[in-house]
Amino acid sequence: METLDIRVLRSIPTPVADVLISRGCRNAADVLNKQQCVPEALQQLRVTDAKRKADMMLGACQREVAHRSQPLCSDAWGSADSALDLLKQAQMQRPIMLPCESLGALLGNALRPGGTLLEVCGLPGTGKTQFCMQLCAAAQIPRCPTFGGSNSLMDGLQEAVYIDAEGSFTPERYAQICRALLPEQNAGGSNTGLLETVLRRLHLCRTYDAAEMYATIKHLDSFLKTHRRVRVIVLDSIAFCFRHEFADNTVKRARVLTEIAATLRRYGSEYGIVVVLTNHMTTRFDKSSGDNGAGWLAPALGETWAHQPSTQVRFERQNAALGVVPLGRATLIKSMEQAVGRSCFFNINEMGIRDANSREV
């Protein structure tokens, strides 16, 4: 099975396969015999941490060849991962470090790549879009102790994808957030020219209806294959189109939303990306209590969609004393790893989202 064409190997992504073919690697045997070509190909594609990822890719290639050479082992169990393997893979992925430490601690591993969905819900004006822009900036400008100046920071700059369904993204505001974050991540270095590079590497797509949003997400795969530095995908918001366009066909809406969620999870897993969506709030009523049933606020799109996000956090605005900037409050309402109900306070100012002072809480 080592004669397998390199282009049919699941363990070798298409962009890497193209580079390896140009270096004379035509099949699995060539890849395994010329292992030094794999990290060189990743470096040519400007993939970060090329040596480690090359070792993982070569290991997956060896398992794939061994698995295909055993006809009696045609099921998935022949190459199944153990729980320890999955834990180690997750721990190797570094989470995005927010400048708001309390919010970063609340979200925990939801900011770590790995095929999960983070949903941020809340009423208008609670800071959902501000959070999305802050997250993109933090992903593009990583906090790394090895940065020794503007040149090394330039090498570490990443990319982000922002799907704007509401038209709420403001480039001037994003530039302001990035301009404030650069000195924090590059203390003592020159930031000349870095801001323009950061802004150029945020890829924005404006969608106007559900069909356009669906097509944009499905066609994102080919874009990610050629932009390996993308570290976060934002969809702001998932509810804007689907709340009204499919109001009379909830079955079709659930099917399309499930497909979108599955596609985004696959991107997060295959490309090492954090996926974040925003959602609206709606009023639900207890039908068992009749017309007098009490109502409460809950994330929109119903119960079917509620099962899709791995983590949900709710944003609110807290009343503040006269002359004091209102505080934001984030509450964890769904999590696969932590107890729900935990919350933290944050400020939204000209720099972006930052920790609230103890005297303000």
Image (cartoon, rainbow, N blue to C red):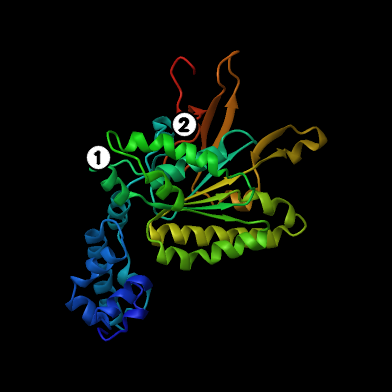
The residue under label 2 is: 351
In this image, 339 relative to 145: left or right? right
Mark sitting earlier along the chain (2/1): 1
Look at the picture and state if 213 lies above or below 145. below
In this image, 111 relative to 303: left or right? left
User: At 57% from the left edge and 43% from the top edge, which residue is drawn?
Assistant: 170
Residue 95 image position (x, y, % from top left): 36, 45
Residue 206 image position (x, y, % from top left): 60, 55
Residue 77, located in which quarter of the rendered image? bottom left
Q: What kind of residue is marked 2? A: Met
- Nearest the viewer among 294 and 347 is 347
Look at the picture and state if 255 lies above or below 291. below
In this image, 243 relative to 10: left or right? right
Look at the picture and state if 246 lies above or below 131. below
Please say whether residue 332 is visible from this viewpoint. yes
- Marks 2 and 1 sit apart, C-alpha to C-alpha, by 22 Å
Farthest residue to the right: give it: 291
The residue under label 1 is: 145
* Count of marks placed on residues: 2
Q: Quadrant of the N terminus?
A: bottom left
Within 10 Å of disc 2 (Cα), the crowding (few <14, some 14-19, many 20+) is some
- Nearest the viewer among 37 and 123 is 37
